[in-house]
Image (cartoon, grey):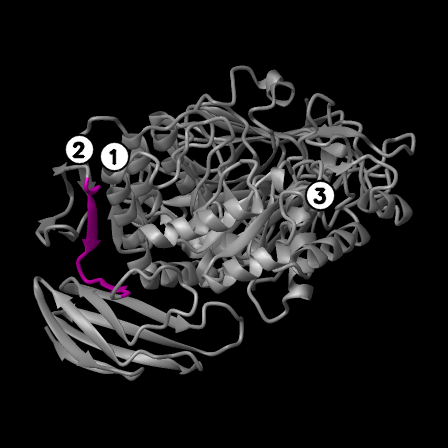
Amino acid sequence: MIAFTRVDSVEVTERGLLASLHGEQLRIEPVREDVVRIKLSRGGVFDDAPTHAVIADGGAAFTVEGNVLRTAALTVTLRLDPFGIDVHRSDGSPVLETTRAYATLNDAFELRRTCAPGDAIYGLGEKGGPGNRRGRSYTLWNTDILNPTAAAEFGGGGDDIEFDPYYVSIPFFYHHATGGRMSGSFVDNGYRAAYDFGEEIAIRFEGGQYTEYVFAGPSMPEILEAYTWLTGRAAPPPLWALGYHQCRWFDYMQDAVEALGARHRELGVPCDALWLDIEYMDGYRVFTWNTERFPDAPGMLARLDDAGFKVITIIDPGVKHEPGYAVFDEGLERDVLCRTEGGDVYVGEVWPGDTAFPDFATEEGRAWWGELNAAHVQSGLAGIWNDMNEPATGSIPPGRMRFDHGTQSHERFHNQYALLMAMGTVEGLRSAMPSLRTFVLSRAGSAGIQRYAANWMGDNQARWDHLWVSIPMANGFGVSGQPFVGADVGGFQGDSSGELFVRWMQYGALTPFCRNHSMMGSVDQYAWAWGEATLELAREAIRFRYRLLPYLYAAFLRACETGAPVQRPLVFDFQDDVTVRDLDDQYLLGPDLLVAPVTQPGMTARHVYLPAGDWHDWHTGERLEGGRWIVAATPMERIPLYARAGSVIPLWPEAPPSTAGYHPEELELRVFPGDGESFLHEDDGLTFDGGHLRTTFTLRGRELSAEVTGDGYPEFARRRFVLVCEGTRQTVENAGTGLRVTL
């Protein structure tokens, strides 16, 4: 690498500083008072849209003295000779201190900065292993982890919980200093990258320009709020998407799918969505139905909808390379398929064999894909499942796949491919269902994916270690801007067991996205597959999720408004507590529920760490002092769950068969004495502008008050609250007004 060592000149602009060095230009510009953008040209030219991640820009008042730029929150010092960039907060505490500000060789570039002993690192999105990334190195290159061709260069197998890289690449991380303060870094670059968090922090990108956003913090919530301001936040989800989802890769017939729905209703297992994997298609041709298996797909979808089931089908980006197949022919005619450098249509390998790939880097390619999705859901589908979108190309390497009519390299758009696919998909769904909230699930992704799609953690294993690793992996997603995430409950590949399934369901029911999914050839993994005892335990876990949906829904809306994760590591709320830095087997669901899953077979008790403050055992009601470890019993009926003192947890009075049309007259409020604020958000759960009511609860000791905003909505039916506090029940008539009550 050739290091940049000396700055030749510096001038002040309307946006910040502009420096010249080594024939390039360097911009240092605050975009908020707590966020600064550092940007370096290549060949003397700036790339002002390196990816599709960033959707916000701004400015902040600043002053310049010499080569030092100051805002109200941070100070940036541009060192001239030797060249360096240091960022400090207004109180002098460090945010970023470079040891090698920039070096480059053959389009790749490298950055190095200090990291003190004992400092912790979090983020980077979907990564295996522990949530604290310190002491490890990572690659950012979206990878189909169980494809031997794609995974070979990274060693090991994709079933290893330490395997890296995974399906999603997000170049955003937090640096947690031993003193408790945090800073953040986001490099707006879609090329393959490597992050090494050893004795110092080393960052390398294989191409593109250096554009970094540095976040002063100093709290984790402040950094995530700023990052999601920059890259966008999730849209409000349809309420049914928070329900229980049943999925299996299986060669279902139409009657079997309807029977599967009926079986859930017969056994009293709440369920909102049934999913169809690749076997529903005609020869794996996307946007088709196998009419022998599904002779009346619209009729089936209508009947399932009447029974309260939404249906979602899988869509891969691989378009069968087959003249006469309408999608392929149209893609050729409209010139919206990826090309090689020589101008040929790039051909990879997915389920139908030889496949072409949409050129999502172009607006016309995304629009075409949106049209196909819009037509597909006209049959009565409720959402779309985007798979194989790393992009996965089977045994054929992807490198010759180019973008923007063959003018752009594969490397520039590889990691962005899933985001661009989701953009086109959502565009289509919104045109087909303009009044309804969309739901798209994606396997791969990059920074900004949260604006368009949820993520699941891909092809996991029916093993206890995969149950465990899904906890820090989901937490990593959450603090990287993606709140809508979950793992396949029970494990996708391999044979689950009754015990593993129950423990995974008890945990999965308390995660943002709850879907039971397994592969063809494995044992049945339905809630009833292991007999009555297992069914009863799984059913109770799912029913509890449904009762908890008002709380979960509020947590999602908080994520949409502030970026705060639905599932998050304890360090998000308790960053000054050194104990929680490396705590990976428990988490917070929303701000007020602490979940401690069972992650090993035969476990009858486990240690749980309760952070500062008082906590209430959900199951027994016992009030417990925090800031210490306790031993919690883990009988097969439940996993440890604690509510924060000062919280109000809204619950439905019962678990309905599905969320469809459910608007109860009564809501239960679990009140845990202490000081705090909570809220309940009620709307139709389907539309963007159908009206709402938001009730904000303020609890001071045992004094509960509430204020209401919003104009209501037509389906609103609530007439009363039932307040439950330390074993007592109190009914309060309330149809959407404020209240004040002593418990």
Q: Which residue is mark 3?
A: 286
Quick check: marks 2 and 1 in contact, CB under 8 Å?
Answer: yes
Q: Residue at 72% across / 50% down in the picture?
A: 49
The residue mark sitting in front, 3 or 1, is 3
Where 60 sits versus 458, above or below? below
Q: Is residue 714 visible?
A: yes
Q: Is residue 575 visible?
A: no
| Residue 103 included in the magenta stretch of the image | no
User: How far apart are the alpha carbons under marks 2 and 1?
Assistant: 8 Å
Where 524 sits versus 527, above or below? above
Tell me which label, 2 or 1, sits earlier in the chain. 1
The image quadrant where one finds the N terminus is: top right
Q: Which mark is residue 598?
A: 1
Q: Amino acid at mark 1?
A: Val
Range of residues picked out in magenta: 637-652
Percent of width and height locating residue 393: 70, 29
Image-based side of 262 in relation to 292, left or right: left
Image-based side of 698 in relation to 504, left or right: left
Quick check: marks 3 and 1 in contact, CB under 8 Å?
Answer: no
Q: Residue at 38% across / 80% down in the picture?
A: 709
Looking at the image, how many numbered discs can be counted on the residues?
3
Q: Which residue is mark 2?
A: 606
Percent of width and height locating residue 256: 51, 44
| Label 1: element kind | loop
